[in-house]
Every structure is written in structure tokens, then in C-alpha cells.
Amino acid sequence: MNLPNMLTMFRFVLIPVYMALFFIGERYAAFGVWLLAGLTDIMDGYIARKYNLVTNIGMMLDPLADKLMMLTVMFSLLWSGDMPWTAAVAMLIRDAGMIACSALFHFKGKKTVPANWMGKLTTVFYYIAILFVYFQWNYAVQLLWAVILFSFITSFMYALLFIRINRKIEVENEISNRL
């Protein structure tokens, strides 16, 4: 358990804190918890890369913590009536699919694809769109739909990268076995 992984685990702890604050009507405090989760996400990735502390468990738990926090915020905004249920369903389908596929392929021994710049950009865009929805700013729902579309494109690109990486490994193994 290294520092980046502890920061990731801390984000899991922040999820019920956010929920409690949001549901007792402390939206600004809940927003602060959400921002803290975002900051720890940036910090754990930076520390892991800078000090070569990247671990397989971290590569799996980090996006899971991100997705669960985003799903929690989405659920709270859906519950409060600030987010359309159709957008929430689209986000849920995409995120649940990513989590399920990631876990399935990890446990099947397939090479997983770490987050790249498109995944990070998608996360930043989601935070911006959810910020607009959270504070009910103009064009919030339109921006959210644009980000949802972008996230599906990003997921498709991750799938292609996953296929390419694992196909390359299979070909290399096949060649190695023939020799």
C-alpha cells in the first residue's frame, strides 16, 4: 500500500461523506468534498508517475474510485431533479460497462489499458459539465450531453486500444511458442 493507493482509498471514503452532506442539504460542503476527491485523484496520479509507484491494483482502483464518485454525484443530481434521467442512464451505461469490462478482462489475465490523455480529458470535461449541472448554470444539460457523447467516443477508442494491445501480445506469444 503506497501513498497513491492510499489517496485512492481515501476517495472511496469521501463518497459516503459527500452523500451525507448532499442529502442533509449541505450542497456547498458536498461540493467541497467532491472537489477534494478530484484533487486527490490528480495528486495520486502525479505521485504515482513521478516516483514510479504505479501498481496494477492502483491502475484498477483509481478509475473505479473516479467512476463511483461520479456516479454518486450523478445520483444526487438525479435525485434532486437537477439532471435529466436520460443523461443519468447514458452515463450509467457507459460507466458500468467500463467498470465491468475492466474487471472482467483484468481477472481473465488480459493486459489492461491505463488511463491516457483522452480518458483524463473526458474526466475533466465530466467535472466541468457536472459543475454546470450542479449549480444549474445556462446550457448545463446541453454541455452534459456533449460530454456524454465524447465519453462514448473515448470508450470506443479505449476498446480499440485494448484489442490492439492484447492482439499484439497473442501474436508475440504465438510466435514465441513456435520457436
Image (cartoon, helix red, strand yellow):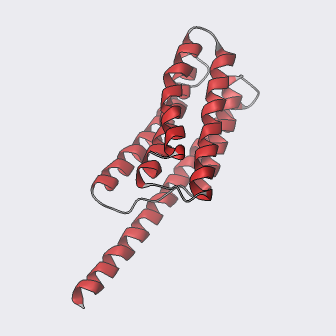
Q: Is residue 161 left or right of residue 133?
A: left
From the viewer's perspective, is residue 167 above or below residue 133? below
Residue 68 can be seen, yes or no: yes
Q: Quadrant of the C terminus?
A: bottom left
Q: Position of residue 157 (x, y in %)?
A: 51, 60
Q: Quadrant of residue 70?
A: top right
Q: Quadrant of residue 138?
A: top right
Q: Position of residue 48 (x, y in %)?
A: 56, 53
From the viewer's perspective, is residue 172 above or below residue 28? below
Residue in the foreground of this view, choosing between 56 and 103 = 56
Q: Position of residue 127 (x, y in %)?
A: 65, 37
Residue under the point 54% across and 44% down: 3
Q: Position of residue 111 (x, y in %)?
A: 38, 63
Total number of numbered discs in the rendering = 0
Residue under the point 55% across and 59% down: 52
Residue 146 can be seen, yes or no: no
